Image (spheres, grey):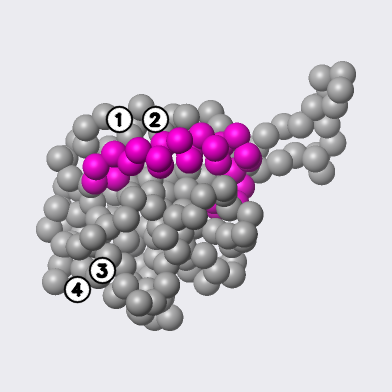
């Protein structure tokens, strides 16, 4: 589901489907529905029988898998807790706990991206929030993006795009 204030962005995304870039950056203030828009577009990209208006049909096997959170050609990368330790290896204070997307998570993508798609269609990777990648994770993602696999789309969702990563995916903007 996307919200009415995203209708212009939805139309822009539909136009992009004809010449899809390998990465998109959905950016804006927190709480405006960017993640919902990203999920809606990801499902539409994976749908086997999209509706005339570009939305996913909600009926095909791909839509069923997506709704259940198990589509084999979709990956969602979110933050994980990274426990901090002090110099002696002791667990640091609760306040120093970080929520990051780690380099290990991004490296998992290499195998996923290099496999053929399950349904011989598109593959979508959604990274949220993109600014939570540590520098090593961002560099690892950059290496994957330098040689994009065919029919693979990375959607990065960010509340703070200026800190998201060392590269510039195509921002979602109007023509």
Q: Is residue 71 visible?
A: no
Q: Is residue 119 magenta?
A: no
Residue in view at x 12 percent, y 58 percent: 49
Return the x and y of residue 17 as percentages of the image width and height: 23, 62
What segment is highlighted magenta in the picture?
A: 128-152
Front label number (4 vs 2): 2
Tag shown at residue 110: 2
Estimate how packed mark 3 is, as few (under 14), some (14 to 19) or many (20 or more) residues with alpha carbons within 10 Å: some
Mark 4–mark 2 distance (CA, rounded to whole Å): 33 Å
Q: Nearer the viewer, residue 57 or 26?
A: 26
Above or below residue 161? Residue 146 is: above
Mark 4, residue position: 53
Name which residue lies at 34% across and 32% down.
Answer: 112
Is label 2 in contact with label 1 (beta carbons under 8 Å)?
Answer: yes
Q: CA distance from mark 2 to mark 1?
A: 6 Å
The prevailing secondary structure element of the residues shown in magenta is helix
Q: Which residue is mark 1?
A: 114
Residue 14 is labelled as 3
Label whose residue precedes the other's in the sequence (4 or 1): 4
């Amino acid at each position: 589901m996307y919200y009415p204030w995203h209708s212009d962005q939805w139309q822009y995304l539909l136009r992009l489907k004809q010449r899809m870039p390998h990465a998109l950056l959905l950016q804006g203030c927190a709480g405006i529905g960017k993640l919902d828009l990203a999920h809606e577009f990801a499902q539409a990209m994976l749908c086997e029988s999209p509706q005339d208006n570009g939305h996913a049909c909600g009926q095909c096997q791909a839509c069923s898998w997506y709704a259940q959170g198990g589509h084999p050609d979709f990956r969602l990368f979110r933050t994980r807790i990274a426990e901090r330790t002090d110099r002696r290896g002791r667990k640091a204070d609760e306040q120093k706990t970080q929520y990051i997307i780690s380099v290990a998570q991004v490296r998992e993508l290499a195998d996923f991206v290099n496999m053929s798609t399950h349904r011989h269609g598109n593959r979508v990777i959604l990274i949220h929030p993109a600014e939570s990648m540590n520098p090593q994770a961002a560099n690892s993602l950059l290496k994957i993006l330098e040689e994009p696999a065919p029919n693979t789309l990375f959607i990065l969702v960010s509340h703070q795009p200026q800190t998201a990563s060392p590269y510039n995916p195509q921002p979602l903007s109007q023509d």
